[in-house]
Amino acid sequence: MNNRKYKILASLLAFSAWAMPVFAEEKSATDYDLKTREVVVTATRTEQEIKEIPNAVEVITAADIKKLGAEKVTAALRRATSINLSKAAMAGNQVSIRGMDSAHTLILVDGKRIAGEDASSTSNVYELNRINLDNIERIEIIRGPGSSLYGSDALGGVINVITKRSTKQQTTQSFVFGSEESSTSTRFDFGKQGKLAVSADIRFTDVRKKDEALSTNTNMFGDKSYFNISADYELDKNKKLVLDLEYMEENQKTYYQDAGTSSINQKEWFDNERYGYSLAYKGKTTKGDYELRTYFNRLKKESRKTNKNVWADFDHAKYDTWVVEGRNSMQVAENHLLTFGSEYRQYSYKGTRLGEGADNVYTDNYLGLAKKGSEKTINSKAIYLQDEWVVNERLLFTPSFRLDEHSSFGSNFSPKAGATYKFSDNSRFKTSYGKGFRAPTISLLYMDMRRKMGSKTVTVLGNPNLQPEETTSFEFSLEAERDNNWAKISYFNNDVTNLISTERLATTPTETKSRYININKAQINGIETEIGRKLNKNFSVKLTNTYLDATDKNTGARLTDRAKNISSLQLEYTDNTAKPLSITLWQEWLNDYNYIPTGATKAQDFNYSSLNLAVHKTWNKSFSSYVGIDNIFNNKVDELNVDGRVWRLGLEMKL
């Protein structure tokens, strides 16, 4: 512990020595061609400049996505600070922010929650790759707890995907060819026709089949389809209606073998669809803005499997999310901007993995098989309040709180306070302290899953007595820009209680049985650093590192599925012409990634590095292309499902 404190103190002192000359200078932001005014809405639910916000914030724009040659949302996030996107089994990715579990990341689309899987092992694993990349305007990432504004699930942070709105008439056709997947997409922007602006997106993706490492198993492969329609209708210059419709379909399958066999003897098919709508009324006044919104989305899942060409098992599931919410931001005094709102959320889940554990038990007959199923609906109500208080020209203080009333466990109070102190226009100190929580989901409370997996039946039971997972978190950081240089360093600390884990109840040759329990306490702290320099008008370089110390407070052991250090060195080139060429070369390192390989009983540390390249060229106002290569030197780590080199080629035409 003392060694860790010395490391933290030494890092802060070293940064302070570099930055202190900046603190004494008073230069305007226009003195630096590096700096632009980046505005986000996720951190405070209001438009706020990143420099002012006490939170750790990162923005990835549509232009950034193109420069990276990203073919899916997880690829667009690869260079984001303190996010672990390691591959999760057959498909999907972890979405871990600052060492917190994937389930502790709240994923939003235009501020809306998404209906999806809710067990500990599946929460958020598939979600990012179910979002249409071509419909994204930008991605806002908030690191640190966000429960004071967003309620449950935002223990580690928030990822808010903000979609495009139609501004001018244009048709965009895109093609992606790659070693992992290929896709084609069309976007129709109808522009503003009188008071109405409409756009529509269509994307088809083919995920390629490949064998997984260390086995003859395959990944989940097959087709995905995305459809989005958005419409803005102006009632007058300060009021409008916003409608969004979305549909997603997955038709995929996987082949795999039982333990102890040498050939594929099981096949499984997955047919999923999600659809939803959102209707919002937005307005502006002389003192602020407001919004009333309702939205609904549903994920329907069907899986079926064979064992030696005989139907062996199936599952059906239906997840619904319905929300009604209102928000108002109002300038109540010269130095106070109040944001307040309320929300009603209802979640429903009906499926065979609930077995007889929930309400309205029924029998599902399918393919000559019969399984029990049940359903459950839970709801929550909330109010929240935030004050953006400009204490003086140097200090911004932002207190906030939220009170949630949940139908399953009662009330939860989530306070947070943050402050930004500006030493000068180009250097600042930020700090925040807050509490977060995650309410147990329907699966965690009521699951009664019995599923055939090879020669065994795997049983997982929910626990209606579960308590919410909770965090107490604080962080502080220093940021500065000087001439063509910039740097940031942050220390964060999360004290986690009531972590939900599983308890093994029985293990026999024919059955494995477990249930969810509150048991773990964890301490997760770390240091984020970023140093960059614009070398000249064409080249810039950036170095980032996240040091993570994540331990189980009960045993003192390191938490698994986390790296002790994640680092990247990034070099960017642009020729700054009317038809720009951009080249991005970056090296990634994961050190001491703590993981329990398949079949092992103890965690092991793994190291991994990858050199990656993306080249994007605009040929004229109508045509651009990119090529991307990940893991150029084909490094493989079979235990972590790192398969080696990945390539992709993309083309975009504007008509």
Image: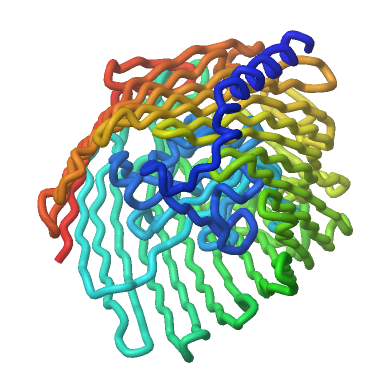
Q: x%, y% of residue 512? A: 70, 28
Q: Is residue 103 visible?
A: no
Q: How is the image coloured?
A: rainbow
Q: Nearer the viewer, residue 168 or 308?
A: 168
Q: Is residue 570 left or right of residue 513?
A: left
Q: x%, y% of residue 273? A: 46, 60
Q: Residue at x 73, y 69 (%)?
A: 340
Q: Residue at x 66, y 38 (%)?
A: 429
The quadrant the C terminus occupies is bottom left
Q: Residue at x 56, y 28 (%)?
A: 21
In the rendered picture of this protein, how many numbered marks are placed on residues? 0
* Residue 497 sits above or below residue 446 on the image: above
Q: x%, y% of residue 518? A: 83, 36
Q: Residue at x 74, y 31 (%)?
A: 493
* Residue 237 sits above or below residue 172 on the image: below
* Residue 1 sits above or below residue 622 on the image: above
Q: Quadrant of residue 207?
A: top left
Q: x%, y% of residue 484? A: 39, 33
Q: Is residue 567 left or right of residue 649?
A: right
